[in-house]
Amino acid sequence: MAWPLGLKAMMLHGIVVIDAFLVSPLGENALAAMGLAGAIAGLLMGVIFAFSNATQIRIAQAFGAAGPVTLKTSFYCGLFINVGMSLLGLIAVIIWGDDLIARFAHTDLIAEQAISYLNIFLFVVLFEAVGQCLASHFNGCGKTKVPFLSYLIAVPVNIALSYVLIHGMYGFPELGVAGAAWGSAVSSLARVAYMAYRAYRDDYDVFTASGWSRDNFWTALRRHWVFALPIAGTFISMTIGTQVCTLIYAKMSVNEFAAMTLILPWVQTAGTFGMAWAQATGITAAQLLGRQLDAASLDVFLRRAWRGTFVAAGLVSLTYLIVILCSGWIYSDLQAETTAALWMFLPVLLVLPFPKGSNAICGQTLRAAGDTLYVMNVFVAGQWACKVPLTLLFVVYLDLSVGWVFSLVLVEELFKFPSFHLRIFKGGWKSAQVIDS
């Protein structure tokens, strides 16, 4: 279950890496523009991912225990919420997006390029509102290969179209940063079309099952919302905190901000090996709890999953090392100051995957058991009592180097570590009752 999740997530985050790689020859200003627009776009996508994650857990709990009606209800409730939240986000960006970008951009040129990228990327938000819900259905049912295959379609489309439109190849207009956004939008549409076809072909009986859980769609939707809100609150808090930090990073020099724009997508992309293992652990734990597996068997399962986490963390750490060692070759057009900043990140990158992976196992297992409010509280505390205020202090007031600022991603994981692990070791999650058909 984990390897398609990992490769899919790697390709999802890899789209940002690809865009950064293709845009990098345009210079540091173009990278800064994409990073600034990406901070706002990432906030919208984070909201969608948040509610999709809740839908995925709901479907996993019902899979094999509650039948097609509950699966159908969970999907349509999740889709309703995803589309509604994406529309609210789009309205907010249309009203306030330009002013927000202009406030944080170093120059008018950076602001103009960032606004152009963001306005086109809004199509990606709409497509992904549907696409992420379809992916949640397949993942929750254990069919993790389907979303993975959708990215095998999307990534080549994104690379080819972005390259052509960024540089104006083969008679197409030279759009610069905006070309990367168009590539992402078209590739997202292709991905959604493939998953919709697979849903129609493979699970038509689920999506057309008669009736709703709780006998009424609106009652089911309200219960789905109550279940999803703490999970969504966790992800939304993480996303808002991350994007707030990105906006604070924009106050650093252009070279330092460009270095952060380059490394953070790599952190997400390579880190998906560990995160996918944790996500698969959470899906499986939800299914096992739905089948009311005994506590001893759950202990055996989690111990094995935990061992796999540390193997994945070692691979992630090695990947980060290779990326930094090859950074001068991968981004040959960068200025020396930007390349030097990338090397400052290496010590943190080598250690980060281990506490992050272990925390992820705890969080996903507790969510699967319905202990979502506690998980939300730990993440909120990590973001708003630790990372965000320290980022503001390091960048705005102390004016520390970019290496010290980047180290806060590790500090945040160490801050959360005791709370997560003590909760797991208490063992209350093993007796959770999760099915509500």
Image (cartoon, rainbow, N blue to C red):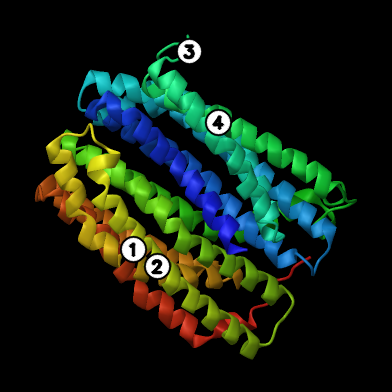
Q: Earlier in the sequence, mark 1 or mark 3?
A: 3
Task: Say which residue appears at 60% left-offset and 73% top-offset.
Answer: 369
The reply to whether discs 2 and 4 touch (Cβ–Cβ < 8 Å) is no
Crowdedness of circle 2 by 10 Å Cα count: few (<14), some, many (20+)?
Answer: many
423 w.r.t. 236: above or below: below
Q: Can residue 299 be seen in the rendering of this structure?
A: yes
Choose between 84 and 413: the one closer to the eye.
413
**Residue 7, percent from left and from top:** 53, 53
The reply to whether discs 1 and 3 touch (Cβ–Cβ < 8 Å) is no
Disc 1 marks a residue whose amino acid type is Ser
302 w.r.t. 396: above or below: below
Disc assigned to residue 157? 4
Disc assigned to residue 46? none
Task: Judge from the rendering whether residue 72 lies leftward or rightward of residue 411; answer left or right.
Answer: right
Disc 2 marks a residue whose amino acid type is Ala
Disc 4 marks a residue whose amino acid type is Val
Q: Earlier in the sequence, mark 2 or mark 4?
A: 4
120 w.r.t. 252: above or below: above
Q: Mark 3 highlights which residue?
A: 170
Q: Earlier in the sequence, mark 4 or mark 1?
A: 4
Circle 4: element type: helix
Disc 3 marks a residue whose amino acid type is Tyr
How far, Cα to Cα, is label 1 from label 2? 6 Å
Q: Mark 2 highlights which residue?
A: 313
The reply to whether discs 1 and 2 touch (Cβ–Cβ < 8 Å) is yes
How far, Cα to Cα, is label 2 from label 4? 30 Å
How far, Cα to Cα, is label 4 from label 1? 29 Å
Crowdedness of circle 3 by 10 Å Cα count: few (<14), some, many (20+)?
Answer: few
Crowdedness of circle 4 by 10 Å Cα count: few (<14), some, many (20+)?
Answer: many
Q: Depth-wise, is mark 1 or mark 3 nearer the camera? A: 3
The reply to whether discs 4 and 1 touch (Cβ–Cβ < 8 Å) is no
Choose between 397 and 275: the one closer to the eye.
275
